[in-house]
Image (cartoon, coloured by chain):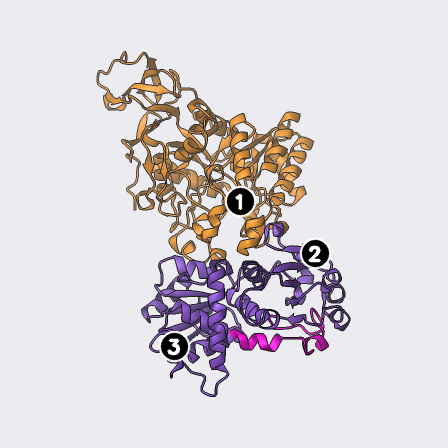
Amino acid sequence: MSNDTYVIRHVSVLGGDPADLVLRDGVIAEVTAPGAASAEGATEIDATGLVALPGLVDLHTHLREPGREDAETVETGSRAAAAGGFTAVFAMANTDPVADTAGTVEQVWRLGHEAGLVDVQPVGAVTLGLGGRQLAELGAMATSAAQVRVFSDDGRCVHDAVIMRRALEYVKAFDGVVAQHAQEPRLTEDAQMNEGPLSGVLGLRGWPAVAEEAIVARDVLLAEHVGSRLHVCHVSTAGSVEIIRAAKARGVDVTAEVTPHHLLLTEQLVTSYDPVYKVNPPLRSEADVAALRAALADGTIDAVATDHAPHPVEDKDCEWSAAAMGMLGLETALGVVAEAMVSTGLLDWAGVADRMSVRPARIGRLDGHGRPIAAGEPANLVLLDPTAPRTVDPAALQSRSHNTPYAGRTLPVSVVATFLRGRPTVLDGAVVGGAAVRA
Amino acid sequence: MKRHLLSAADLDRDDALLVLDTAAELAQITDRAVKKLPTLRGRTVVNLFFEDSTRTRISFEAAAKRLSADVINFSAKGSSVSKGESLKDTALTLEAMGADAVVIRHSSSGAPHRLAHSGWIQGSVVNAGDGTHEHPTQSLLDAFTMRRHLAGGKGDLEGRRVTIVGDVLHSRVARSNVLLLATLGAEVTLVAPPTLLPVGVETWPCATSYDLDAHLKHTDAVMMLRVQRERMNAAFFPSEREYSRRYGLDARRMAQLPDHAIVMHPGPMNRGMEIAAEVADAPRSVIVEQVANGVSVRMAVLYLLLGGANLGDGTEA
């Protein structure tokens, strides 16, 4: 099958010296000196000046299906993911119905398989209906076809300490991890934005940093006590960073993620009262952004995860307090990380590969992703052009929704191609292949 | 002046004095037997009230009518809003009707800002109170009232000491007053239990205190804010009586004020809670006058925002 062979010429692997990559039968068949790979019968791609990273892995995506297909579907979300350079996404459980049974996670997994653009790995709910009271059948989800390893009530906090403790303990039986949405509910009732001087001036109810930090602190202590693995979703405050840093230093098995928007945007944007900037956890202060960048750079925060949260126009085109929380992330994540971390010298491309592919794949126990770019490894790759800035046009996004906070903003890099097991899902910046035609 | 009045911070010192001076001129007309000016004839002012406030609505209505504007009252109750129509669709409807100015009251902070900046409507937007954010025309009428009593009815409020007492956290009146009074040179002190002061209040252009008695002797105007009794259910304070004892203005506390000091309240009052009945009805209470001044100030705001014909033409009518 000659059409299935690709030779990628003169590509900079992880930002290093140029090489040729030969992709065949789903794997990287060869890595050779630049210009040395045989092109016989293969499709050649001139990748001079491009950087190759392992396909990106997003630990935190809302694909909205089943239930809110007006906002996103597994198929449109998969297109967005591929366009953003991702080869695997973890689909959060807060769908309707909630992904709290083997049947629902298998449905999402199957839809992802049918779309065929990215590996869609379902996250299972921790508690039935995200209700926080009774554990969902975690074992059934773990042994289903979807082989769930990450469990989260994301959108809601598992705030009951006993339920959290039991969940942390229970998932040890199948090497699972509880991904906590750290938000003390009583301290954040009807919260609208970061609590601080600006919330006081704008008259918007505050979401205090301590509401996140109190849960992070409790959970690392619980994880330490029961010897379990904890993952903290969308860390947003300098205080949480300090707690996680100290826990890691003690040897607690805790990992953490940060969103692209918390690495780049601050609460100052809320002065516009434009709900495109309304997100949970909220945009924070400059000091928090600086602490999050430093923590991602030094590895205290393990991964970038998008918290891609599509919403239909009517849920954002309204007054602030009536608007839904969340923003798109898949198609801009790499560009935002490039601006926040690479342009600033905090991470090189190898570091980006580690935080956006290697570590998230490991946290989610996703074999076949986040692997080295070497002969014999699965051919999951993204090629990016580090010298081709791209201006974000909401109408041009693959997502069914348009609620990007980066409209009109120019991000420093572009995704040129994405390969899923040796097959292109994006070529020349356009989504190709996939099983279904976009609705 | 800017095209909209969304925040007291939209007014620099010159703007604020222009509004107050214009209001003073218009107030003289209000004292005449025929109170009407032709200035805004043919212009349409919409009172868009998503939240009940009969007092503020009729004040704006009277102001617009005295300037001969056509007034449309659009209240959430009995309108399509209660059936779930969005702010956007309501705005587009008003735009189709040709509103020159929209006076909006909304429970959501920032709704007037959204209305003004989303491209839904072309006219001027006047914030008549949004959530716990601002109420700029209230601060203008308060400044107007203070200027009459404390500054001879002209100029700014340089050096005048204003004490604002009560639920600052949830008060749009306090936010607008702090901003405008600082612009006009007054020295503002916010007095409240710590639970009812916003995080970051130390960055505001005012002082704060937890002790009402300590400030009364050095106050030219004391403004009592309405305190909702339900706040105690969220543990902002233990009980009505404790609140009243520590932060209510009763006759004993009023007696500590200097002789020239005035007592203000934006209304509606909880008599017996933040203000005792004998204080509300005392000679130094200017609470009723605040209401009358509200019409003059709102006339001035509409007049200036809509760029009506110059005032000289109008007074000849």
Front: mark 3 or 1: 3
Q: Residues within 10 Å of mark 2 (few under 14, many from 20)?
A: some
Q: Quadrant of the N terminus of chain A?
A: top left
Which labelled disc corresponds to residue A281?
Answer: 1
Magenta extent:
B266-294
What separation in Å lies between label 2 and label 3 (alpha carbons)? 46 Å
Q: Position of residue A386 (x, y in %)?
A: 35, 27
Label whose residue precedes the other's in the sequence (2 or 3):
2
Which of the chains bears the disc numbered 2? Answer: B
Residues behind callouts 1 and 2 on a single chain: no
- Residue A235: in sight, yes or no? no
What separation in Å lies between label 3 and label 1 (alpha carbons)? 55 Å
The residue positioned 61% from the left and 29% from the top of the image is A245
Q: Position of residue A404 (x, y in %)?
A: 39, 45
Q: Secondary structure at mark 1?
A: loop
Q: Secondary structure at mark 2?
A: strand
Q: Residues within 10 Å of mark 1 (few under 14, many from 20)?
A: many
Q: Residues within 10 Å of mark 3 (few under 14, many from 20)?
A: few
Q: Position of residue B266 (x, y in %)?
A: 60, 70
Tint applied to chain B in the drawing: purple
Front: mark 2 or 3: 3
Q: Position of residue A270 (x, y in %)?
A: 48, 50
Residue position for label 3 = B312
Q: Quadrant of residue B55?
A: bottom right
Q: Quadrant of residue B99?
A: bottom left
Quick check: marks 3 and 1 in contact, CB under 8 Å?
no
Residue position for label 2 = B209
- Amino acid type indicated by mark 3: Gly
In magenta stretch: residue B22: no
Tint applied to chain A in the drawing: orange
Q: Secondary structure at mark 3?
A: helix
